[in-house]
Image (spheres, rainbow, N blue to C red):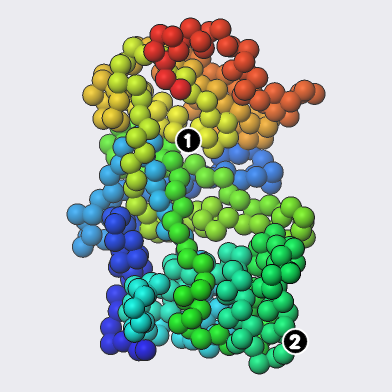
Amino acid sequence: AAAAAAPSDALAFLGRAHPKHAVHACRVAASAELTQQPQHGSVKQVEFACVAPTAKDAAARLTYAMADDLAVCCDNGAALAATVAARLGLDLEQVFELSGGAAAAPLPTPCSVAQALRYHTDLRAPASKELLLLLAASCADAAEAEALASLARPDSRQAYHDRIVRDGRGLAELLTESPSCKPPWAALLELCPKLAPRYYTISSSPEADGGATVHLTVKVLREPMRGAEARTKEGVCSTQLGSLATGDTAFVSVRSSGFVLPADPAAPVIMVGPGTGVAPFRAFLQEMRAGGGGGGGGGGGGRRTGPSKLYFGCRRPDEDYLYQEELASYLADKTLSDLRVAFSRAQAAKVYVQHLVRDDGAELWALLQRGGEQ
């Protein structure tokens, strides 16, 4: 049903969709590729400005503690939303309201079709069998209806897995494959998978720049699907983050992780983080360099005096050694006592961080006996 008015901006919609979290609109301050050979797998460092992008939201500054989690609200993007809206015969700017029935509406309305298709409905997630049956019942063409309905039958478990789950076929693709399908809008919103926020461990400390920016270290998922190599698996949120340019906006919220340095500044710190798993430890090292070393992320414990070891793993030093120069600088100024790097593909025998940990077993056990935290 049409409604008289609806919040016009995405931040207002997402604030209603996630009422338990303070959602912030944050502009990208910088974005950089961290790998030396991104064709083998891209990893982006995305920096968001914590200051609200508009004067009217100035009070809504984002604040966080070292190694908290940043929840990113997924965005299907304007292009995909427009394609699906056109396929359904809907106007992106049309405002609608869901009403009636005892069950709660699947999304906050009134809202626009664009808001529903960009920020609420997962247009690419594998379709459920219930959604397949709805689409089948909405087809004018009998062959299209049968193709969809057959996948939802109890004896079609393998076919459903292969075509829908393994191949990652969601609403957008199924609508393209079945041009006679005209599903009812309200039922579609009820049965489509919902876009849930994705959580990333923050890879910066507010102590490093006075809380001006918050950093994410994101592996961009874009790879051939196993068993269906002709198709590409793309992470909904990681590809979104990977494509952001300086000045673009994302909608985020902060969740406390409780991941903190030991309260005793003299306690040894042992960090193991291969690949993007180094993210929280980069935040630790920034905090330690700035002189904040105590538990709770606020620097109350003073500068750390205990030893600190970082184990980092990647494939090759000239391919995906993340933060190589930055880690070397932590060694140089004694923020980091020891850096152990495992290159899994740089030599004949594969070497992983667990091999280095095993080799250093006696030393690590002695540090843990002294109160080290892993």
Q: Amino acid at mark 2?
A: Ala
- Compared to residue 199, the image places residue 337 above or below, namely above
List x then y, in percent, for residue 114: 44, 76
Visible residue check, residue 354? yes
**Residue contact between numbered discs 1 and 2, judged by CB atoms under 8 Å:** no
List x then y, in percent, for residue 99: 34, 83
Position of the N terminus, as image quadrant, is bottom left
Residue at the spot 45% in from the left edge and 29% down from the top edge: 281
Image quadrant assignment for residue 17: bottom left
Visible residue check, residue 329? no
Element class at badge 2: helix
- The answer to which of marks 1 and 2 sits earlier in the sequence is 2
Mark 1 crowd level (few <14, some 14–19, many ≥20, 10 Å Cα)? many
Mark 2 crowd level (few <14, some 14–19, many ≥20, 10 Å Cα)? few
List x then y, in percent, for residue 52: 28, 55
Residue at the spot 55% in from the left edge and 69% down from the top edge: 123
Image quadrant assignment for residue 276: top right
Residue 350 got which mark? none
Q: Nearer the viewer, residue 80 or 180?
A: 180
List x then y, in percent, for residue 209: 32, 36
- Mark 2 sits on what residue? 143
Q: Amino acid at mark 1?
A: Ala
> Disc 1 and disc 2: Cα gap in Å?
50 Å
- Compared to residue 30, the image places residue 196 above or below, namely below
- Mark 1 sits on what residue? 279
Which dot, 1 or 2, sits closer to the camera?
2
